[in-house]
Amino acid sequence: MRPFPGYALATSLKILVLAAAYLGTARLGLALASLSDSASPVWPASGLAVAGLLIFGMGTWPFVLIGAFIANLLTPGVGLLTAAFIALGNTGEAMLGALLFARIDGIEKERLQISRAAAHGLAAIVAPVCSATIGISALLVAGNLSWNVNLGAIWVTWWTGDALGILIITTLLVALREAKAADYRPSRLWATLFSDLLPVLGLTAAALVLPFLPVARTLLGPAAALGIFLLYPAILLAARRYGPAAAHLVVLAAAVAYVLGTAAGLGPFMDATLNQSLLNMQAMLATFALTAIVFSDIPHQSARLGSTVFLVGCLVATGVFMDRTDIARARDEAHLGKIVDSAMARIHERLLVYSNALESGAALYATGLPVGRAQWRAFAGTINIDGRYPGINGIGVIYPVAPDGLEAFLARVRADGAPDFKLHAASTEPVLDDFADALEYDVITYIEPAGVNAPALGLNVATEANRRDAAFRARDTGLPAMTKRIILVQDAQRRAGFLYFIPVYMPGKPLDTVAQRRQALRCWIYAPFISEVFFREALRDMVEEVNVAVYDGGEVRPDALLYRKISPDTLGGRLAARLGLKAAGLGMAEQVSRVDEGGTP
């Protein structure tokens, strides 16, 4: 029989439209790829491919090849040949899935009562093996993947995304094709509004919203996650009253909501990485999809007992899930507590290390020998700042200068190897001393390494209240002191930072009172820090497990942020700890920085 005129054109149009749809869904899936750029745990394109062949015929297979080729070619680093081989694997998957479905679905009900469910299940399990294996092999040969990565995890991610795509999308499209319009007439929907439709919609809405709604999590705690189990009765009711298409629409709604929520870092499926979180979600969606598939295929006369047994099983599963969630959360909270304690200890330890470096500078002055620019540069070279004290931006000396002695001070400094030395302000407005009606000059005179810290040389820290208050606190207490959040003048990137001061007093002077310490002050040894560098060094080798945010003071405000580290593949932890950071024994009892740590251990 010869094709009717225009058959080839109609087929070509179908292929192009389906290829565009495949390309769109494939790109959506790849947007969620994190373990590998080519392997996504969410892959609706596989379901569209199998359904397209089942509905429009095996002759439309080129749409899968075209759509998959373009989608993979758009992936960074994937070449023409690699994209072609991956596309062949996707096409083979679609054809194998369609053939398996048609073969099993054709078995008579007398021989296999749930042949439709078996067809969907077998297609979803077997067909993705083809795509995942060929795709990963092509990426290995092309060098896009190496043998050093976790190939098993990538294969499982690829297979899972494709399998769920078939379970959710193929089943829905096939059911919609076979749906009876009479089941969805407005008159029937209105007649069943209160008995069936509203319960289905209500249960579905609750299952989609409760696990992600902040108010629900606040009021119910971990129990809010149990809202996902409300989807089971919604699926059963939809399948019994409105047919398979309605049940699969409920599953699709759950898939869309759960993907969006999990990708945003919300909900009960969150784990250490985005990939693992989406795999957790897919495992739950698989049970929903299988529920819809099986109960849509069970004859009505067998459904009542099956539904009852299934719902009882769901209640038991809910209890087990709740118990396991509590156990897992308690374990994770204990682990997070250890991480937080370790982080705090490291920060305090790092501050003590830097304090020791500054104390060694103070010891140089305690020798009684003259200290000039050359001597300070030599001292800084001996302590090896970059090698032994990573995270510190430099080490310097600040001299207090009486207003009437400023010109003589500048002359001495210029004669001591800094002929271009100039005084400049940290703020545009001068600040009066709280203890004397005179302008205060506290000048950064030496700073090493000199190159990166040149803009700080000559800075009068007394012209800015934050720097000045910390310096005076160190002077009056005799203990180290730290500024609040500042922007270092030497940091071209204008990142958050802070200064750390240690007072140096003249030998032999009494230091029992505040007045005596003010009178005996000789200078300050100080260190500038860029917060990002300091905390990155202090938390080295441990920040990959947690997200960290450090704020100056007790409030979470953008202008108080000192440091934030968010792992690129972590979307907000299930657990969080908030605590005050005090440098015990360092003279900063009244100054508190807040450290927020959240993670998914």
Image (spheres, rainbow, N blue to C red):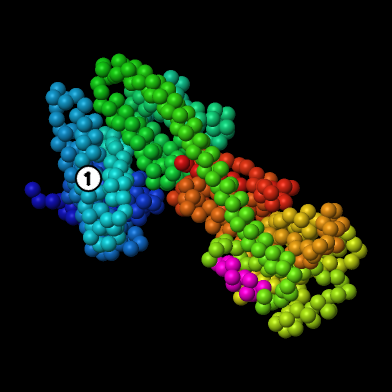
Q: Residue furthest left?
A: 1
Q: Is residue 158 visible?
A: no
Q: Which residues are magenta?
A: 376-386
**Residue occupying the point 30% across, 31% down:** 290
Q: Judge by depth and name the residue closer to the eye, 302 or 364.
A: 364
Above or below: residue 576 compared with residue 351: above
**Residue occupying the point 75% across, 63% down:** 504
**Residue occupying the point 53% across, 52% down:** 539
Q: Judge by depth and name the residue closer to the eye, 462 or 445.
A: 445
How far across and down, in percent of the image, does residue 149 sit?
A: 31, 53
Above or below: residue 445 compared with residue 80: below
On screen, residue 126 versus residue 464, left or right, reads: left
Amino acid beneath label 1: Val
Above or below: residue 148 compared with residue 369: above
How far across and down, in percent of the image, does residue 377 sit?
A: 64, 74
Quarter-wise, where is residue 109 in the image?
Answer: top left
